[in-house]
Each structure stands twice: as C-alpha cells, then as structure tokens.
Amino acid sequence: MSGKRILVSGAGMGGLCAAWWLSRGGYEVTIVEQAAGLRDEGYMLSVSGAGCRVIEAMGLLPRLRQAALPINRNLYLDARGRTIMRLDHGKLLTQLDHHVLLRGDLADILYQSLDDTVTLQLGTKISSLQQDVRGVDVQFGDGHSRRFDYVIGADGFRSEMRRLVFGPDADFCHHLGMQAAAYWIDGTTALEEDMVAFAEPRRMSMYYQLGARGVTALHIWKSDLATAPGPGARKAHLLGRFAGSHQRVIESLTRLSATSPVYMDALMQVHLPDWHRGRVVLLGDAAHCLALSNGQGASMALAGAYCLAQQLAADSSPAALSRYQQGMQHGIEALQRRGRNAARLYLPDSAWSYRLRNWVMGAMPKSMLLNYFIKSAQEELHMTDHIQLRQADGRAPS
C-alpha cells in the first residue's frame, strides 16, 4: 500500500473523515478545499446512528459529546404567536444517542484529529483532470499538476467534481420544492426556550438558542427556484418571502445588515446510478444528498468515508469503489424515500391542512406525541442498519 496517493476534494465532514481513515490504511492523502478556511456554512448538523459508530471508532465520541448543543425544550407557535405545542426534544435525543452541534465544531474535531501525513491545501481549486487505468492526472487552478491513484469528490451537493466527471447538476439533482436560509442573530437576543418556531402554511421560521454564542435562525419555505439569489439580495428576498409573518420574524430579518452572511440554497436530493467513474469516486452529499428533514446527511458522509476507506485498505483496485457503493446504497435509498415523503408533509400547502395538523399536534397527549417522534426517529436510524460498516477483518466498529 505504501506510496499510494489519494486526492480528496472538499474539507467537509466526509472529506476529513475519509482522510483520517485512509491515512491509517497506508495512503498518502492530500485534501484540497476551495475556501480559504474550513467551512461553517449550514450552521448546525446532527450525528447519530452509523455516524456515531464511526466517530466512536475514531476515539472522538467524548469530544463530540462535549461539543453537543443542548437543544432540549422546543416551542412551536403560529404566525400570531399562539402556542401550537411544546416538546421536550431532549428526551428524544437522549434515547437515540443523537447529538446536535455546529458544523464548524465537528469540522474542527475531525481536522484536529488528522495526523501529519495528511496535507490540507486551502484556497485550492481543481481545474481539470484526466484519468487512465492506472491513475488520475489533476490540474490545479494555480497551474501545477499532480498524479494520484484515486480522486475523491467530497465537495457537497453542488459538487464541482461531479460536474467535471459525471455531468451537469440538472442530471442528478432532484428538487424537493423548498428552499432554506440560515444566519446568526446578534448576541443580545434571548429565547424563552432552546428552540422557538413560527409555523405557517408553506413556510416556517426556527430560532435556536446556542448558549453564549447567540441565536441562529433557520427559514424554510416552498419554492421551485433551483438557485439562491446573490449574497447582496438575500435579505430583501427573505423579507419578501416572509412578509406578513410574526413580528419577531420580521424584526430578525430587518436587523440583518447588508454584509451579514446568509446561507441560502434549494433543498435537493442527489441521485446517481454509479458513484464512481474509473478512479474518481464521490462521497457524502456529492454522491447522495438526502434532505434537511432526514437530519442524516453528516452521519451518512461519515459512514461513507469509513466504508470507502476500509474497502480501499482491503483492496486497492477500482473494484473497491463498487463495493463501497454496494455497502451504502440500500440504506441511502431508504433514507431518500423517507426524506421525499417527509418533505411533502413538512410545510402544509393550504391553510386547511395547516390548521388540521396543528389541531392534531395540540390535541395529542404529550407522552403519545413524544413516543411518535421517538418511533419515527428509531425507524429512520434502523434504515442505516443496511449500511455495512465493516473493517478489513470483517468486524464492525464498536
């Protein structure tokens, strides 16, 4: 295995995790990232199920638990501020070993765990690549080139690597009919609960209290637009989309400055028949983006990184790439089906269906409602049991 070189495009959760496992399998790993630093867009994510098992096998579970955010008490209100329901989300999370944390914190945990054999090059873009049966020649944006045994595209659902090798986004990205936006609110804002949501027909605004770090906002709304407006137009776009919402929603948007960073994009799933072409393979959202309603994107990126690295450690031939997909695909397809179904119910289209949902949620006993959410989450986690987390000797990570 000595001397085998792998290029990872993208320093997100999947890319960093893959580098960790590949370096321990004897590969020389280089990570390139277009951004000038580790990305923290997306703000929050969750790790559970297969993702937790991978993190535990890396010896990083104590650090992950230390960084986890206490999103326990949830309050759901309507556009007029009337209570729809309260839910102790903490009881749900403790029963499922489910951890919510900031994207940047998980990226830092993974990055700090890398050994000196992994090279990270920030502000680096891949401009082109050519492959043959023995390897891949990669041309970088600054003009220099290198040859690698394999290239891994772990650069998100808007993957540049996928466009270079597989084809345009329109061939693989399937719109779920929604867009989302997230941003930080100034540190002087305080919420009455850990999470406060304003639910309306076709749109929802959620606010999360993240201790001393402040409050982060997440907006989701029905839209068929495939792309987001430019950064300078996002505040005005959100004010238009949420006109007539609760006053607190309008105030949070009004306080955004022209330079406030706002993450915004369409909610899509990625479907590819094959996750690799020759010696180029996709990982995480680049290969199989799920949906926001699943909450499993980070965990599946971690699980995929582990599966791919273990297959390449056992067999450095391109056949390992096919076995990686075979080990992951059944569980991924089950999660994508569930995500599509949930997306149709997440934001009711009509005022009538919205009021009916609110009445059912408000009338249902709290114990029954909590059991419903626990059962639903357990069913989703059981779908990841299909994902074959196996070491080279056949053992599963503890």
Image (tube, helix red, strand yellow):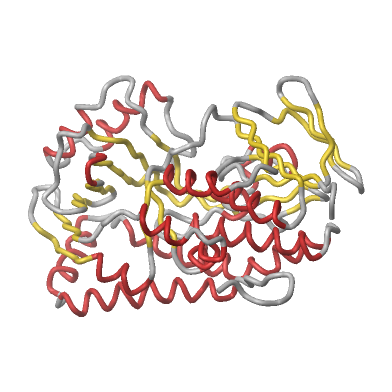
Q: Is residue 372 left or right of residue 392?
A: left
Q: Position of residue 358 (x, y in %)?
A: 17, 64
In this view, 82 is above or below 187: below
Between 229 and 56, the residue placed more toward the observer is 56
Between 316 and 115, the residue placed more toward the observer is 115
Q: Residue at coordinates 26% horizontally, 40% vertically from top-left? A: 213
Residue pushed farthest front? 116
In this view, 1 is above or below 362: above
Look at the image and tell me in which quarter the N terminus lies: bottom right
Q: Residue at coordinates 15% horizontally, 53% vertically from top-left? A: 193
Q: Residue at coordinates 28% horizontally, 41% vertically from top-left? A: 216
Q: Number of labelled discs?
A: 0
Q: Is residue 299 left or right of residue 123?
A: left
Look at the image and tell me in which quarter the C terminus lies: bottom right
Between 99 and 253, the residue placed more toward the observer is 99
Q: Hey, which quadrant is residue 158 in on the image?
A: top right
Q: Position of residue 166 (x, y in %)?
A: 73, 44
Q: Is residue 257 left or right of residue 138?
A: left
Q: Position of residue 382 (x, y in %)?
A: 48, 76
Does residue 148 appear in the picture of this structure? Answer: yes
Does residue 162 appear in the picture of this structure? Answer: no
In this view, 6 is above or below 38: below
Q: Residue at coordinates 30% horizontally, 54% vertically from top-left? A: 69
Between 267 and 218, the residue placed more toward the observer is 218
Residue pushed farthest right? 133
Q: Hey, which quadrant is residue 302 in on the image?
A: bottom right
Q: Position of residue 372 (x, y in %)?
A: 29, 76
Q: Hey, which quadrant is residue 214 in on the image?
A: top left
